[in-house]
C-alpha cells in the first residue's frame, strides 16, 4: 500500500496532520506508535514502520497485556512516518475528526521476515515502547473482503499480565509525550481557535474560560457587523 489512500481522505489545507510523504527506508531501527483517537468511536491506532510508511491498524478496545485477550485490529491505510509524532485535533468535517493523543512511542523488531508475515497474515514482533514491551502477534482473520480484520495478541512472556483486565489503559489515560489527557489536548485547540478569532494574545486565557476571558474585540465586532 502506498500513501494515496491517506492523501485521498484528507484536505491538507484544513487538517494539521502531516502531508503524505514517503520516508526513508530504515532497516535497522523501525519506529512504533500508538495514538489514542477520539473520533466517531474511540479507538487506538497501532502503527508499525515498514518501507518508509507506518502500517496501521485501528484497535477498538486498545491493546491488552493478557495473552488470553484477542483484540480486533482493523487494518487501515498506511500513514506517513511523520504521523508518528502527531498529537492534536483533526477539525470537524475532516476525516477522523476528533482528538489524537500519543499514547505510546518506541521501536519495534520483526521476528522473521515482516514482508512474508504480512503476506501470509501473521506478523510476529517485539515492541520496545515506553508502555508496551515484549512479544506480540498480529494475526489476519478470514475477512468479508471489505476490511482486513486482524487480531492483536500479547505473547505469553515476562511482559505479559495474565490476570489483567484491561484497567491499565484507564490508568494510562494521558499522553506519553505531553502528559495531557484527551480533554486537555482538545482544549488547547479550542483556545488557539479562540485566540485567532479574537486576536487575543493574553496568556492568562489559558487559565480561564475562553468565553469569559477573551471576547471579540470591539474593532473585530464592528468589522464583522459591517460585512
Ligand atoms: Mn484513527
Image (tube, helix red, strand yellow):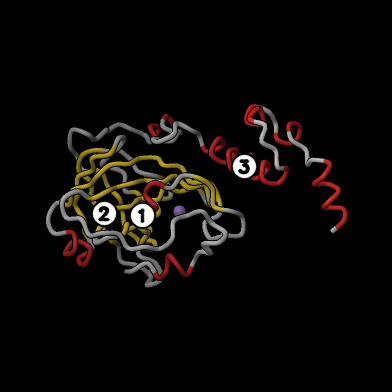
Residue at position x 53%, y 39% in the image: 185
Residue 2 falls in image quadrant: bottom left
Position of 59 with respect to 125 (left or right) is right
- Placement of the N terminus among the 4 image quadrants: bottom left
Asked if the residue under mark 2 is in contact with the one under mark 1, i.e. CB atoms within 8 Å, the reply is: yes
**Mark 1 against mark 3, which lies toward the viewer?**
3
- Kindly tell me whether mark 3's CB lies below 8 Å from ligand 1: no
Q: Earlier in the sequence, mark 1 or mark 3?
A: 1
Residue 148: % across, % down: 35, 65
Residue 16: % across, % down: 51, 53
Position of 159 with respect to 95 (left or right) is left
Residue 73's label in the rendered image is: 1
Asked if the residue under mark 3 is in contact with the one under mark 2, i.e. CB atoms within 8 Å, the reply is: no
- Label 2 sits on a secondary structure element that is strand
Residue 80 falls in image quadrant: bottom left
Q: Residue most toward the bottom? A: 145
The residue that label 2 is drawn on is 138
- Kindly tell me whether mark 2's CB lies below 8 Å from ligand 1: no
**Mark 2 against mark 3, which lies toward the viewer?**
3
The residue that label 3 is drawn on is 192
Q: Specify few, some or many for label 2: CA neighbours under 10 Å numbering under 14, 14-19, or 20 or more.
A: many
Residue 196: % across, % down: 67, 45
Q: Residue 216, relative to residue 52: is it above or below? A: above
Residue 178 falls in image quadrant: top left
Distance of mark 1 from mark 2, alpha carbons? 8 Å
Q: Specify few, some or many for label 1: CA neighbours under 10 Å numbering under 14, 14-19, or 20 or more.
A: many
Residue at position x 58%, y 38% in the image: 188
Amino acid at each position: 500500500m502506498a500513501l494515496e489512500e491517506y492523501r485521498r481522505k484528507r484536505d491538507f489545507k484544513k487538517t494539521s496532520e502531516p502531508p503524505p510523504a514517503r520516508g526513508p527506508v530504515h532497516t535497522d531501527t523501525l519506529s512504533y506508535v500508538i495514538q489514542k483517537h477520539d473520533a466517531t468511536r474511540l479507538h487506538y491506532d497501532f502503527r508499525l514502520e515498514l518501507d518508509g510508511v507506518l502500517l496501521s491498524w485501528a484497535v477498538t478496545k486498545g491493546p491488552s497485556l493478557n495473552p488470553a485477550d484477542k483484540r480486533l485490529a482493523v487494518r487501515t491505510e498506511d500513514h506517513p512516518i511523520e504521523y508518528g509524532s502527531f498529537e492534536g485535533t483533526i477539525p470537524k468535517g475532516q476525516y477522523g475528526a476528533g482528538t489524537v493523543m500519543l499514547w505510546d512511542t518506541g521501536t519495534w523488531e520483526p521476528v522473521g521476515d515482516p514482508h512474508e508475515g504480512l503476506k501470509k497474515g501473521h506478523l510476529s514482533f517485539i515492541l520496545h515502547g515506553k508502555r508496551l514491551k515484549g512479544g506480540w502477534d498480529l494475526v489476519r482473520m478470514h475477512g468479508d473482503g471489505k476490511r482486513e480484520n486482524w487480531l492483536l495478541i500479547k505473547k505469553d512472556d515476562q511482559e505479559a499480565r495474565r490476570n489483567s483486565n484491561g484497567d491499565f489503559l484507564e490508568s494510562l489515560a494521558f499522553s506519553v509525550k505531553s502528559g495531557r489527557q484527551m480533554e486537555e489536548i482538545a482544549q488547547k485547540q479550542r483556545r488557539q481557535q479562540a485566540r485567532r478569532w479574537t486576536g487575543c494574545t493574553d496568556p492568562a486565557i489559558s487559565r480561564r474560560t475562553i468565553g469569559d476571558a477573551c471576547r471579540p474585540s470591539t474593532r473585530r465586532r464592528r468589522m464583522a457587523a459591517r460585512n
